[in-house]
């Protein structure tokens, strides 16, 4: 996307001015199209959780919470890791942040010196590129290749050099819906240990896996806990993206470094939402399996719909996104397709080419978010079927 430079903006952020989500969501509002672009649900989170936030406000939890987060939430994060992954986390090694976003930013800025390299898997969530740039780091992308978005271990190994500091891993993965396999995680771990690298994992879609895929935190692999910062948030799992309650955990010194930066960004945030997130993390197992079952059904609905329209749909066993190739519909470029789509049939999607350094690898691919009510998805498919003609 080209956009005129802003003379006031620091040089390293000039390339990050436009967010594709902002552009496409604005297009959705302008045209009244169904927004399958941005990843937020069109229903509310669990009522016991929203009620807990209201109660917390009534109970007077409205001043600055502790800078590392309230103890109850840090304990709930530790309990959650033990319950789902048999992972032992000391609540003192948990830092609560303003969404996974702030945790990611603080982590990269705390741990990457100017000039050091950070490996990301492309297509990558655009915030990664921006925070690496803010830290003065250098991004090095390893491509996830269609149809299954696997990576070549030799390419990953070749991307490591004396300046490499960190590997960032997002699984389940936005925008592709890929869940990294155990073999892939093992390969990342092997290389991180061999080259003494830090690893940052973004696990915000951890409860959204289907078809027998299971989320495995990289920190649970042998030799990885000591070098991994694990990041997640409640926005996606509980359908509360506007609350922006996230967290990070890592061994004491690593998380201490992250905390140092975090305290100078927001210091702290969201007192009543932190309290309510304790209720959320302690929801019954039935909530989490229900979430996955429900999203899998919607995934099937959108995959069938897109396939019947003629898209080449790539497999997605996690998150609430699915990607598709627009080539069969007569487009070479996903950006052109997404700019035309609202006018042609009243739907918004997002081109994934903007999440690649190697734009050719993702030129004809677009992403659809299916975290919408079933009737909205039916209507979107109905509209998209106009493209088939
Ligand atoms: C991969 C990934 N990481 C992080 C975030 C941001 O999470 P939060 O809203 O908790 O800041 C998102 C939101 O879309 C995401 O897709």
Image: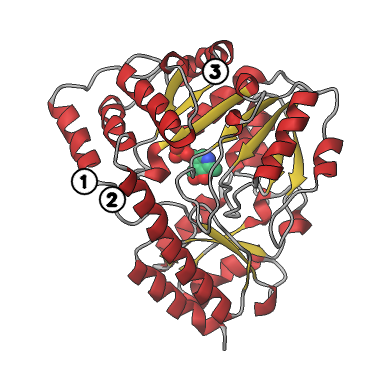
Q: Is residue 181 above or below residue 66?
A: below
> Could you tell me which secondary element the residue under label 2 belongs to?
loop
Depth check: give the residue in front, 348 or 220. 220
Which label is found at residue 258? 3
Neighbours of disc 2 within 10 Å: few (<14), some (14-19), many (20+): few
- Residue 117 image position (x, y, % from top left): 76, 28
Q: Which of the two labelled residues, at mark 1 and mark 3, occupies the earlier sequence position?
A: 1
Which label is found at residue 44? 2
Residue at (53%, 70%) from the top-left corner?
303
Q: CA distance from mark 1 to mark 3?
A: 33 Å
Which residue lies under the disc numbered 1? 47
> Could you tell me which secondary element the residue under label 1 belongs to?
helix
Taking the image as shown, residue 232 lies to the left or right of residue 332, namely left
Q: Is residue 350 above or below residue 126?
A: below
> Could you tell me which secondary element the residue under label 3 belongs to?
helix
> Quadrant of residue 57 in the image?
top left
Do we see residue 239 in this rendering? no
> Quadrant of residue 282 in the image?
top left
- Residue 4 image position (x, y, % from top left): 65, 46
> Quadrant of residue 52 in the image?
top left
Residue at (54%, 29%) from the top-left corner?
230
Tell me the quadrant of the picture where the C terminus can be found.
Answer: bottom right
Badges 1 and 3: C-beta atoms under 8 Å apart? no
């Amino acid at each position: 996307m080209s956009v005129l430079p802003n003379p006031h903006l620091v040089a390293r952020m000039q390339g990050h001015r436009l967010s594709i989500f902002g552009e496409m969501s604005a297009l959705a509002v302008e045209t009244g199209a169904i927004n399958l672009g941005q990843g937020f649900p069109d229903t509310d989170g669990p009522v016991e959780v929203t009620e807990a936030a209201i109660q917390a406000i009534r109970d007077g939890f409205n001043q600055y919470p502790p800078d590392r987060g309230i103890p109850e939430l840090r304990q709930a994060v530790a309990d959650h890791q033990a319950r789902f992954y048999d992972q032992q986390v000391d609540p003192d090694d948990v830092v609560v942040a303003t969404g996974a976003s702030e945790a990611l930013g603080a982590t990269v800025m705390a741990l990457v010196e100017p000039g050091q390299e950070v490996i990301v898997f492309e297509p990558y969530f655009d915030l990664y590129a921006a925070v690496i740039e803010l830290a003065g780091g250098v991004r090095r992308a390893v491509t996830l290749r269609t149809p299954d978005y696997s990576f070549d271990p030799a390419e990953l190994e070749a991307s490591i050099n004396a300046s490499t500091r960190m590997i960032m891993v997002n699984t389940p993965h936005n925008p592709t819906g890929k869940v990294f396999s155990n073999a892939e995680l093992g390969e990342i771990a092997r290389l991180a240990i061999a080259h003494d690298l830090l690893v940052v994992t973004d696990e915000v879609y951890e409860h959204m896996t289907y078809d027998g895929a299971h989320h495995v935190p990289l920190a649970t692999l042998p030799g990885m806990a000591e070098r991994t910062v694990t990041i997640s948030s409640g926005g996606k799992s509980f359908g509360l993206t506007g609350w922006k309650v996230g967290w990070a955990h890592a061994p004491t010194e690593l998380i201490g470094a992250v905390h140092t930066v975090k305290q100078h960004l927001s210091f702290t945030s969201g007192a009543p939402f932190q309290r309510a997130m304790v209720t959320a993390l302690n929801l019954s197992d039935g909530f989490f399996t229900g979430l996955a079952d429900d999203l899998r059904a919607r995934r099937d609905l959108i995959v069938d719909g897109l396939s019947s329209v003629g898209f080449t749909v790539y497999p997605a066993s996690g998150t609430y996104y699915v990607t598709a190739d627009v080539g069969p519909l007569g487009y070479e470029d996903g950006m052109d397709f997404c700019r035309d789509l609202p006018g042609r049939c009243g739907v918004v999607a997002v081109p994934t080419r903007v999440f690649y350094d190697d734009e050719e690898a993702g030129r004809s691919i677009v992403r659809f978010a299916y975290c919408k009510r079933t009737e909205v998805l039916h209507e979107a498919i109905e509209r998209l079927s106009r493209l088939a003609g």
